Amino acid sequence: MQSLKARILRIIATILGFFGISSTFVACYGVPINAIGGRIFFDENNNSSYDEGEEIKGLSVKLEDTSETILTDENGDFYFIVSQNMEEGTLLIEDTDGEENGGKFKTKKIKRSVYDGDLIKMEKDN
Ligand SMILES: [Ca+2]
């Protein structure tokens, strides 16, 4: 079970994420937390950038070396609150959703720092 502090920090990060404020902002402006997160999308119209409607909901994101696994929300967003000393983590992104996504996307493993940009692009598993 998460500590109350961890839950509060997660809520703060979710709210910041909701307003499009990246973890970089959090790191730069002295809010005493680090967050590793972002938005996961598939470039449906193949223009090499994220467009509204391309976000992927319900992907499983695991932060390696921790026991934490979360699902992307309806905006394709996810956030992990990490300790102030942690600047980088490895994410394992899997399409384990048996319903709407159901293995449509390739599993992706990437390194991600708290200073990285917000967008993570997925490939389809054909
Ligand atoms: Ca696009």
Image: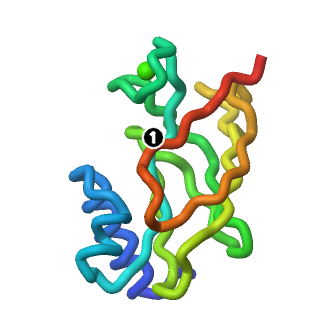
Tell whether circle 1 marks a residue whose Cβ is less than 8 angstroms from ligand 1: no
Ligand 1 lies in quarter: top left
Question: What is the x, y in percent for residue 17?
Answer: 31, 56
**Mark 1 — residue?**
76
Question: What is the x, y in percent for residue 108?
Answer: 71, 43
Quadrant showing the C terminus: top right
Considering depth in this image, is 28 or 1 the residue closer to the camera?
A: 28
Decide: is 6 above or below 96. Answer: below
Quadrant showing the N terminus: bottom right
Question: What is the x, y in percent for residue 36?
Answer: 49, 64
Q: Residue, x 63% and y 68% (percent of image)?
A: 89
- The local secondary structure at tag 1 comes to loop
Image color mode: rainbow
Considering depth in this image, is 73 or 121 the residue closer to the camera?
A: 121
Q: In this figure, what is the number of numbered marks?
A: 1
Q: Residue furthest right?
A: 126
Q: Residue, x 26% and y 61% (percent of image)?
A: 16
Q: Is residue 54 left or right of residue 85?
A: left
Q: Amino acid at mark 1?
A: Gly
Decide: is 109 above or below 5. Answer: above
Q: Residue furthest top?
A: 45
Q: Residue, x 60% and y 42% (percent of image)?
A: 59
Residue 28, image quadrant: bottom left
Q: Residues within 10 Å of mark 1 (few under 14, many from 20)?
A: many
